[in-house]
Image (tube, helix red, strand yellow):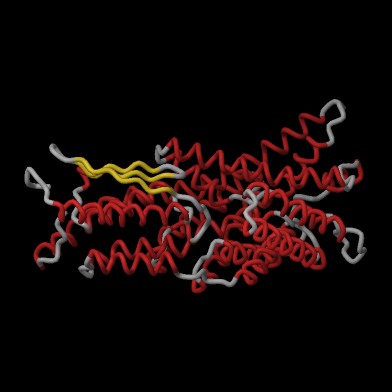
Amino acid sequence: MRENTMNDQEVLLLRRKLDLLLRTGKLLMESAADTNRIERNMKRVAAFMGIPEEKLHIDIRWTMIMVNVSDERHSFSKFQTCEKHGINMTTISQISKLSWRAIEQDYSIDKYEEELGKIASQPRNYAHNLVAIGAGFACGGFCKLFGCDWIAFLFASVCAFAGFQVRANCIKFGINVYMSIAIAAFVSTCLAYASSYTGLSSTPYHPLLACALFIVPGVPLINFVDDMIDNHLLMGITRAANTAMIVGALTFGIAFVMRVLGMSDVAIDHKFSELSMVPHDPYYVYAVAAAIAAVGFSMIFNVQRRLLWVVALGGIIAVCTRNFVNFELGFGPIIGSFMGSFIVSLIAVKAVHWFHVPNHVLTIPSVIPMIPGVLMYRSLLAFINLHGVVGEVTIAFNNGITSALIILCISLGVAIPNIFARRYIARDRQLYLKQELEKRRIRGKFIEW
């Protein structure tokens, strides 16, 4: 495009480059990368392909990515739909590495397309049944963090395992994703309620609090905060809406089973309101529970096997920091949760250079165990059981707002160190990118657009 006209071969080559660029963005979007990361990776790949950044225009939406390359005489646009949204931390990490490797090792367009195809077609790190077991134990870890005994831990794990399998089968059969979530929450809660009648556990109602928490939309929520702070407002609002739909489906499934089985009676509500928020087990017990929950969510998010122990350590640091700030220092659960996620994210800023993975791969599974399940259920039950008594609405809103603030502070704690660190090192990375591209020009390997 340096000349006034382009021949057919040049046009076809540019269209192929745009197609590969869009396929890269699609993989990142469908793997739950935040918008800033998608944009950065696409610009890096465009630089590898010889497309000048000043002539590249990218528009990222939830279901569509649009790319335009234009100069004074020509303009080429291409669109790519994004259909299946999941969470795949391995794909996010591998595409980031590929974008740098393509520049450093003088990849051809064919070589880049081949490597991108391998990433797109590779199987997940864990078999489905193993992920279901991980999801079950993750919810069991949640249950233990809420103060249950080990029998209730097993009940919560079994109920969550069943719910996870139900949701997977519903999606496989083509049922709407939000309806699948509601059905899974219904099944998990039914089984947890049935387990409370076995008489084997001294904390029979705790599994009700944890059995459906494998559905918690931690990644969309943190990405929403990231996008809003990075001024990607439209994508942030879309992710917030998706998060609200997931939470709404989860709430509907739980509320429906409570009505069907008569669980919304005063006795159950009283049991939940009596649950202590003060740790009554040694710190090592909470450390073990946090590690189990973090590893379970890592398997759901398809984190690499070599990083499981790192995420487990992150979960321990997050939960123990929260408990220390909350109870030992007396700053409360909101500040405690913020500090727990902030410390983990701060450590991850350095740890990403040790393990060569994006920040969110380490931080998000680590902070998920701090989700305030007890307060969420207290708020839910309070709204379901409104009878017009003075103070009911106040209690319901107090628990709801407190749990929402805790979740928001967890998200902010993860996002803030990452955003500041990213801006701090952006110049160095941009300088390194220019140096590598210049080396390619000297070697005669630079791909002209």
- Whether residue 283 is visible, yes or no, is no
Q: Give residue 119's position: percent from left, percent from top.
A: 40, 67
Residue visible at 59% across and 72% down in the picture: 127
Q: How many marks?
A: 0
- Whether residue 113 is visible, yes or no, is yes
Q: Give residue 93's position: percent from left, percent from top.
A: 41, 63
Residue visible at 56% across and 71% down in the picture: 126
In the shown orientation, is residue 57 left or right of residue 136?
left
Residue visible at 64% across and 67% down in the picture: 134
Q: Nearer the viewer, residue 241 or 149?
A: 241
Vertical side of 190 occupied by 300: above or below:
below
Q: Give residue 431's position: percent from left, percent from top.
A: 21, 55
Q: Give residue 219's position: percent from left, percent from top.
A: 54, 51
Vertical side of 380 occupied by 300: above or below:
below
Q: Nearer the viewer, residue 83 or 378?
A: 83
Q: Dividing the image into 4 quarters, which one contains the C terminus?
A: bottom left
Q: Nearer the viewer, residue 224 or 52?
A: 52
Which residue is farthest left? 3
In the shown orientation, is residue 278 left or right of residue 295?
right
In the shown orientation, is residue 348 left or right of residue 371?
left
Residue visible at 56% across and 66% down in the picture: 313
In the shown orientation, is residue 409 left or right of residue 169?
left
